[in-house]
Image (cartoon, rainbow, N blue to C red):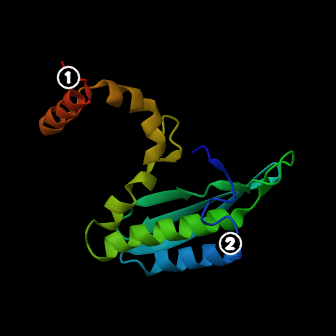
Amino acid sequence: MTHREIIVGDEFPYHRTDVPFDRSMAAIMGMLLAARGVVKVAPLYENVGEVQRITLMVETEQGAQFLIHFPTTYRRQRKGTPPKLDMRIAGRMMFFHIKDMLLMAEVAYLSFTQVFSPYLALPDVDGRPKPLMDFLPDVEEKVQASRPLIPYLNFEMQQLEDKRRPGP
């Protein structure tokens, strides 16, 4: 997966977090290991220039494997100053994101695999593992170009368009 880079400003919720990244990562790993059916959680750190890319590898007892990539986060500085790397922001973002996903699995609204399906590891054309969500850009245009599959939604959308048109 292409690790995403995010630049946040003062308006972003975790802009001024004091929680160290390592503490967020330890809490995330603990939550995942406590989840029903999870047997392995391991972080992978990859140095790319001055940036360290971080991925959590998760495995369930059924053998499903997941790759959860953390975004590289930068905090916007004063004008004329380049953004500053601040992985504390990514730690808090991912902590709450994963916590919310685990809640859905815990109350059995969806299974763990269903909730974490965007991160499900599948082989790419070269056989390397890649999260399911990384396959979507390849087919997104085809999906958007296809006709909607839900007839009721088509009807509702047409009604909305009709209401927007000025009357005679």
Name the side, left or right, on which 149 lies relative to 102: left
Front label number (1 vs 2): 1
Front residue of 65/97: it is: 97
Residue sitting farthest toward the front:
168
Q: Which residue is mark 1?
A: 167
Task: Please tell me which residue is depicted at 40% across the width and 67% down the height of the picture.
Answer: 101
Examine the rendered structure and indicate whether residue 33 appears above or below residue 8: below
- For label 1, the SS is loop
N-terminal of the pair, mark 1 or mark 2, is 2
Q: x%, y% of residue 93?
A: 57, 64
Front residue of 21/74: it is: 74
Task: Please tell me which residue is depicted at 29% across the width and 66% down the height of the picture.
Answer: 111
Q: x%, y% of residue 149?
A: 19, 34
Name the side, left or right, on which 70 lies relative to 117: right
Residue sitting farthest toward the top:
168
Examine the rendered structure and indicate whether residue 126 appears above or below residue 75: above
Q: Which residue is mark 2?
A: 17
Front residue of 16/115: it is: 16
Name the side, left or right, on which 53 lies relative to 13: right
Instruction: Kindly identify the amino acid type of the residue bearing the numbered disc 2.
Output: Thr
Instruction: Kindly identify the amino acid type of the residue bearing the numbered disc 1.
Output: Gly
Q: Quadrant of residue 20?
A: bottom right
Residue 55 visible: yes
Task: Please tell me which residue is depicted at 17% across the width and 37% down the height of the picture.
Answer: 156
Examine the rendered structure and indicate whether residue 55 appears above or below residue 166: below
Q: Quadrant of residue 27?
A: bottom right
